[in-house]
Image (cartoon, rainbow, N blue to C red):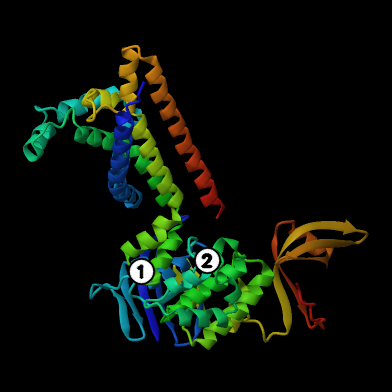
Amino acid sequence: MTLDLEPLVLTLKLAFITTVILYLLGLPTAWLLFRTRTRFKPVLEAIFALPLVLPPSVLGFYFLLMFSRNGWLGQLWEQLFGHQLAFSFDGLVLGSVIFSFPFMVHPLQAGFNAVPANLIDASYSLGKSKIETMFRVILPTMKSSLLTGGVLAFAHTVGEFGVVLMIGGSIAGETRVASIAIYDLVESLDYQTAHLYAAILFIFSFAILMTVYLVNKKLDLR
Amino acid sequence: MIRIDVTKKLMGADGPFELAVNLEIAPESLLTLYGKSGSGKTTLLRMLAGLEKPDRGKIEVNGKVWFDSRAKIDMPPQKRKVGLVFQDYALFPTMTVRENLLFAQEKKEPREVDKMLALTGLESLANRSPATLSGGQKQRVALARAILRTPDILLLDEPLSALDPNTRRRLQDEILKTHRQFGLSTLLVSHDKQEVFKLSDKVAVIEKGRIAKHGTPLEIFFKRLTSNKFSFVSTILSIRKIDAIYLAVVETGNELAEVVLCENDVASLSPGDQVLVASKAFNPIVMKLPEEH
């Protein structure tokens, strides 16, 4: 029996791209949520936290409507890039970004909250601009939150199943990630290969979480 | 000369009040803002640093206008040359002592930093992380960092109140030395009378956002200095009867003392009362206390 590595590679690729995009989107969002004084903050926080509580099938269902050829986003996408958004890798990335959004934003927001306000004031008073303060004072001080957010977003994307099933289906090399592959294998009664994939995901997830806790412990001790 | 004339509505513990302060700080002098917490001292300091905006008024430092509500001038904190020292030190935890000092410079001049480290006796700590320093050491680093900015005004926000009494005393000396050595104009926020007396040229007492008193520490705290009388506001802790006399334990500051009361006094006094304990025309014993270590 030869193990087809494609679903695993695809999973890692999806998780990696999703995490990078989530850093770019999550940092400004968390910063704005931390700084804003608007009355609508609870509304915004509730919207951003929705993926935590909604069943993946509900999210997947709405994504499917939006991403399909008849959905507004799907139509726009097809005009811009010439291929369908649903059942494509791009669609999976977009879905994962939304689905894993709170896993990135919550740790970052908590991280911003934990940076002493005096450090920021001190940096401004030492003549440092907001941008410089962000990159030299705030972000280095909340390293453990940055790590936690990234790893949680990554791991959550690796572990997602429902949303992918709804909007991606199981197209080899395009949308068949590891969790989908396991489902397919079990359906076709290939328990042996399913075991292999499952064990790999199991060990991988454990190792990643273990690393976070170890590194965070080290960062906290400093 | 530093001129501050600002007002701002503040939210206090018992309702809103207006901070309205008009102050001048002479060059190379040390002015202390003295008052209870919540009186607006720290807000005033933050307004000088540009971290909070006054509702109305003007702040002028050495001829430069930092804030003017009428002319719509509000210089950002980055442009104001202030040295800010906080009670919690606010050292950057991800940088070493040396990196903290380097961060304060606009143009990196490591030699200047090394000079400052030598001057403040921090050389041996240069490569340590702030987390490994004692409170006193941290505050010395914070002070050095503030001075490296070559500030027009040094702002000290209760810099020593988190430290133990011995360290506090040593650092008071150091602040005074630094203040004189660099010819700084300094604004100190403090609620420690002893500290105020030791460090300040002038004191402004803030009550509910207003300057209630302004003068030298001697004028403010020792009005009765010339009447040869010792008197202290004290609290009665207990009164007990022994034979024909009454003995009361009174607390003055942190000191306890026992005083004799006669029957007439006792009738109107009970534990918890605030009293003035005074002694006229007596011969106090003055002894030098052994140095604490």
Residue A74 point in image, percent of width and height: 12, 32
Q: Which amino acid type corresponds to the residue marked 2 in the rendered image?
A: Tyr
Q: Nearer the viewer, residue B185 or A96?
A: A96
> Which image quarter: residue A132?
bottom left
Q: Give the vertical position of B162 relative to A78 (above or below).
A: below
Give the structural element (helix, strand or loop) at label 2.
loop
Residue B37 point in image, percent of width and height: 52, 63
Q: Nearer the viewer, residue B13 or A156?
A: A156
The residue beneath circle 2 is B89
Res B241 visible? yes
The residue beneath circle 1 is A128
Q: Nearer the viewer, residue B98 or B251?
A: B98
Q: Residue at x 67, y 87 (%)?
A: B226
- The number of callouts visible is 2
Q: Is residue B196 toward the left or the right of residue B166 in the image?
A: left
Give the structural element (helix, strand or loop) at label 1.
loop
Q: Is residue B140 toward the left or the right of residue B267 in the image?
A: left
Residue at the right extreme of this rendering = B243
Q: Residue at x 43, y 43 (%)?
A: A148
Q: Which amino acid type corresponds to the residue marked 1 in the rendered image?
A: Lys
Q: Is residue B8 toward the left or the right of residue B174 in the image?
A: left
